[in-house]
Image (cartoon, rainbow, N blue to C red):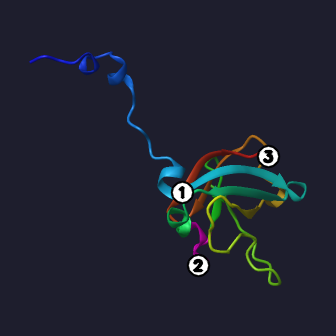
Amino acid sequence: PHRLPSDLPGSPAARVPAPRDSLADRWGVEIEGLRRTSSGYMLDFRFRVLDTAKAAPLFVRATKPYLLDPVSGAQFQVPNPPKTGPLRTSNPPKEGVVYWMFFANPGRYLEPGASVTVVIGDFRAENLIVE
């Protein structure tokens, strides 16, 4: 049988890896950043909604987000002060809008340059660098 050049080992088409699942494709969001704030005692996580239907699970109030330090296994929660409630956006998602949530960083444990994972239910944003 005749083989097309793209079927031959080492051809450009044969070397292209399969597309991987991205946060935009699966969850309809794009990460804007993870920055220290409040003198380093809080971490400000920002993400833009690209698809409201896909992003909806990130806005379920019963889901408790946390930030994971994969090196130590430490988990950092979203503070829930009695007067304000959880320090996270809880409005229904709208396309193109940037949303936020704060994670506690007691003792300024996570320094700029640390690689962490944000977990919200089944959502995982891995290898985020603290700015």
Few, some or many C-alpha atoms within 10 Å of disc 3 (few <14, some 14-19, many ≥20)? Answer: some
Q: In the orientation shown, which residue stands out farthest toward the left?
A: 1
- Label 3 to label 1, Cα distance in Å? 29 Å
Most prominent secondary structure in the magenta stretch?
Answer: loop
**Residue beneath disc 2:** 62
Q: Is residue 109 left or right of residue 72?
A: right
**Labelled pair 3, 1 in contact (Cβ < 8 Å):** no
Residue name at image x 65 percent, y 58 percent: 96
Rendered position, 32 above or below 105:
above
- SS category of the residue bearing label 1: loop
The one nearer the camera, 15 or 94, is 94
Task: Please state the extent of the stretch shown in magenta in the rendering.
Answer: 58-64
Which residue in the structure is indicated by mark 1? 28
Badge 3 amino acid: Glu
- Quadrant location of the N terminus? top left
Q: Position of residue 33 (x, y in %)?
A: 72, 49
Q: Give the left or right position of residue 111, taking residue 29 as reference.
A: right
As drawn, 73 above or below 91: above
